Amino acid sequence: MNKFTLAGAAVLAVALGIFAVTRFSEQTAPVQETTAPEDGAAMVAITLPDTLSPEGTMGKRAFDAVCADCHGDNAAGKMGIAPPLIHKIYEPSHHGDMAFQMAAANGVRAHHWTFGDMPPQPGVTRADVTSIIAYIREIQRANGIN
């Protein structure tokens, strides 16, 4: 047997071995089942700031009373209901504070998410929204959204 035939047989044997190992491992790998999050589940994991400013503390109270039913605890969103406000879409350079004021006063047509339109919140004052914004911005900063 010449050297080239022997080398070719060795390469073929190695290739078949690699094929068999990868094929076998793909067939025996455990299948991981994934389930969709339930409606109402938090959409994002967030880190809370160590402390809130006095304005942020007032904003948390107002947020919990008016916004949390839809936007979730600590603005983490609710699957199937409303988006998280602790998200890069709502960073100050994209949705400034005035966008939050206008959303509360006038409502918002759906444009980034598929949850549907947000209705106006007539029971919320501009001062309430200012405090809510302070709260949201403090959580955003704690999560690297500036």
Image: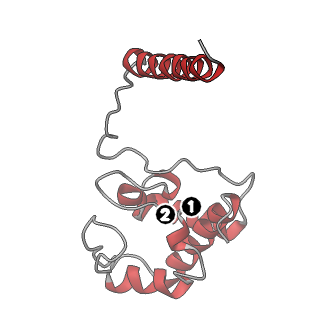
Judging depth in this view, the residue of 10 and 138 nearest the camera is 10
Q: Residue at x 58, y 50 (%)?
A: 46
Q: Residue at x 39, y 62 (%)?
A: 83
State if disc 1 and disc 2 touch (CB < 8 Å).
yes
**Residue annotated with mark 2:** 63
Labelled disc at residue 119: none
- The quadrant holding residue 144 is bottom right
Secondary structure at numbered mark 1:
helix
Q: Nearer the viewer, residue 25 or 13?
A: 13
Mark 2 and mark 1: span between their CA atoms?
A: 5 Å
Q: Nearer the viewer, residue 109 or 61?
A: 109
Residue 135 placement, left or right of 121: right
Query: Which residue was labeled with disc 1?
Result: 60
Where does the image place residue 45, in percent across and percent down from the top left?
A: 54, 47
Q: Is residue 108 left or right of residue 26?
A: left
| Residue lying at the far front of the rendered structure | 2
Q: Position of residue 124 (x, y in %)?
A: 41, 76
**Residue placed most toward the observer, 112 or 46:** 112
Q: Amino acid at mark 2?
A: Phe
The quadrant of the image that shows the N terminus is top right
* Vertical order, 26 against 51 (above or below): above
Position of residue 52 in the picture relative to residue 41 (left or right)? right
Q: Position of residue 41 (x, y in %)?
A: 38, 44
- 10 Å neighbourhood of mark 2: few (<14), some, or many (≥20)? many
The amino acid pointed to by label 1 is: Lys
Query: Where does the C terminus fall, quadrant-wise?
Result: bottom right
Q: Residue at left 33%, top 46%?
A: 40
Q: How many labels, in total?
A: 2
Q: Secondary structure at mark 2?
A: helix
Q: Position of residue 63 (x, y in %)?
A: 49, 63
